Image (cartoon, helix red, strand yellow):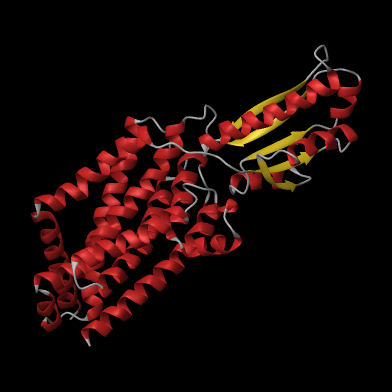
Amino acid sequence: MIIEYLRRILALIKKEFITIWKDPKSRGIIIAMPLLQLFVFANAITMEVKNIDTVIIDRDNSVESRELVSRFEHSPRFRKFYFVDNEKDFQAKIDNQKVQIGVYINNDFSSSVKSKKPTDVLVIADGRQTNSAAIAGGYASQIIEGYNSEITGAKGAGINPVIRNWFNPNLEYRWYILTVIIAMLALVITLLLTALSIAREREMGTFDQLIVSPLSSFEILLGKTIPPLVIAMGLTVLMTLIIVAGFKVPFAGSIWLFLVSIFVSLLSIVGVGLFISSICKTQQQAILGVITFQMPSVLLSGFISPIEDMPPGWQYLTWINPVRFFIVLTRGIFLKGMGVEDVWMNLVPLILIAIVTLSLASWTFKRKLD
């Protein structure tokens, strides 16, 4: 019985691969389009920074150091400030992308200023967001240099801003954009393949044949899930190899964690695509459904605007957006070498989203069969 069960599923999977691959236009969309967009987006996309969140350690806690901090607080370029008293919390804020930069003031800051000795103020920028890091570091340098000019004068010893970029020391813009483009293109291709699968059957008139076949609704959904998932996984791995070998973006993390993260992320997106496909009668409706989901998911992913800058209600909404966690995982594993604990924190929401979306797609599909 198990052999017969597997035989039916494999037959449906084989049929799905043949259906997808036999159409020349589909082959062009599946393979050529994401690879072409990969190269176009790598050179054409730019970003703009409007608000900057900052974490601060003030070891000196003097009048002079507080005055410097107040210059940041009164700058229109900066918004949220997190004051911490240890390096662990300081690093965590940057690692978890709660802030764009960190400012570290040494405990000899005021004594150096009073004695007119040179002193450094360390500014740490999150290099994973290259555009934000460059602009935020520039703003911080301007504030520090302006404060230095006021209290020391042109002939003073000088307060020197020291800029350090974590995870991307040279602020290679392609490092940031390419690690995000992987998630964006995987989203597009996975949604299209899954959203069109059941709708295509209805439009071509073969859906009734599936209904009268020995396949159960679960087997049909499983057969519709595996081919798009395999194709999307293969293309994502191919794009990763191109980015590493062709664009020389360093891969700092674990390849196994990366593959698991891709699989879970794509599975959550497959659930969304199957749900769209199960409620649509034509391929045109399915494409419109994909566009309807895709644009808000990209806007709420943190790709264009930092999530912390969004209104509180929209920030809560991002927790049900799989693209948000997909981007964090690809960028974090690539550039930071994200560990198991950090990866797991982002996989849990994706697993929950996958369970909900796949269950909803199954329930909707069964209703359509009944």
Residue at 50% x, 42% y: name it: 337
Q: How many discs appear? A: 0
Question: Is residue 175 toward the left or the right of residue 368 in the image?
Answer: right
In the image, residue 52 above or below residue 155:
below
Q: Residue at x 39, y 60 (%)?
A: 264
- Residue 145 image position (x, y, % from top left): 73, 24
Measured as percent of width and height from the top left, residue 139 is found at 65, 31
Which quadrant does the N terminus fall into? bottom left
Instruction: Tell whether 246 sits left or right of 103.
Output: left
* Quarter occupied by the C terminus: bottom left
- Rendering coords of residue 83 (x, y %): 76, 46
299 left or right of 13 in image: right
Displayed quadrant of residue 101: top right
Which quarter of the picture shows residue 227? bottom left
**Front position in the image: 76 or 252:** 76
Q: Check the image and name the residue furthest to the bottom.
A: 370
198, 215: nearer the viewer: 198
Residue placed farthest to the front in the image?
A: 76
Q: Is residue 184 above or below residue 225?
A: above
**Residue at 15%, 53% in the rendered image:** 26
- Front-lying residue, 144 or 32: 144
Q: Can you name the residue that lies furthest to the top here? A: 155
Indicate left or right for 114 with 350 as reference: right
344 or 179, nearer to the observer? 179
- In the image, residue 351 sits, relative to residue 80, either above or below, namely below
Does 1 appear above or below 90? Answer: below
Query: Residue 23: x and y, percent?
Result: 9, 54
Query: Residue at position x 57%, y 35% from top?
Result: 133
